[in-house]
Amino acid sequence: MKRLALSIALIAFSAHSYALELTSSDISEGQLMSSKFEYKGMGCDGGNLSPQLSWSNAPKGTKSFAITAFDPDAPTGSGWWHWTVLNIPATTTSLEQGASGKLKIGHETRTDYGKPGYGGVCPPEGDGMHRYQFTIWALPEAKIDLPTDISPAVVGFTLNKIALDKAVLTATYVR
């Protein structure tokens, strides 16, 4: 019985150790983000920088990556999309801080701010703590052919439909 339990534990650990992982030198799971990642506009006065992100352990068959940043706590009834990037080559494993708008790889599409590129965190004042879910998506296609002005909800639907795997890093912010 002990051998069976040990075998199951080793299999579970082995399977977990190869799961797609997302990390950042700028943001941490469950922790408050710096104001340099806050939007500049709509009553917010931050630096509007996209955070540094790194990922590893992509599943076999990954031909590209996508990144999304989403606030499920926005008082809209449907959350708020802060960033969508498609067609990041499978050989890429990180983006530096402030990469949005300067990407030589990938394809940034429209966010809920109405334009492509990272739109920083900007919860309404007094609305409490908001969660910001940064997600790396491992995709089986080298190119997802969606226009720049596509609805971010369509991007999210497409990614959920085809992803091989995803990893989420959730940071917080409050004003």
Image: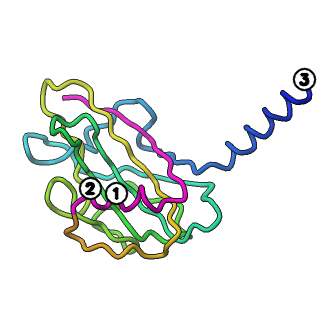
Residue highlighted by disc 1: 157
- Which amino acid, by three-letter code, is at mark 1? Phe
Instruction: Give coordinates of residue 19: x percent, y percent.
Output: 62, 48
Q: Quadrant of the N terminus?
A: top right
- Which amino acid, by three-letter code, is at mark 3? Lys
CA neighbours of label 2 inside 10 A, class few (<14), some (14 to 19), many (20+): some
Residue highlighted by disc 2: 153
- Which amino acid, by three-letter code, is at mark 2? Ala
For image coordinates 14% across by 24% down, the residue present is 126
Say which mark, if any, is on residue 13.
none
For image coordinates 28% across by 45% down, the residue present is 37
Q: Mark 3 vs mark 1: which is more N-terminal?
A: 3
Q: Is residue 157 magenta?
A: yes
Q: Determine whether 2 is above or below 119 in the image.
A: above
Q: In which quarter of the image is the C terminus?
A: top left
Magenta segment: 151-175
Say which mark, if any, is on residue 2.
3
- Secondary structure under tag 3 reads helix
CA neighbours of label 3 inside 10 A, class few (<14), some (14 to 19), many (20+): few
Which quadrant would residue 16 be assigned to in this image? top right
Instruction: Give coordinates of residue 66: x percent, y percent.
Output: 42, 62
Marks 2/1 in contact by CB < 8 Å: the verdict is yes
Residue 59 is left or right of residue 55, and the answer is right
Spatial CA distance of label 3 from label 1 is 44 Å
For image coordinates 18% across by 38% down, the residue present is 77
Spatial CA distance of label 3 from label 2 is 48 Å
Spatial CA distance of label 2 from label 1 is 6 Å
Instruction: Give coordinates of residue 94: x percent, y percent.
Output: 49, 59
For image coordinates 85% across by 35% down, the residue present is 7
Q: Determine whether 8 is above or below 54 in the image.
A: above
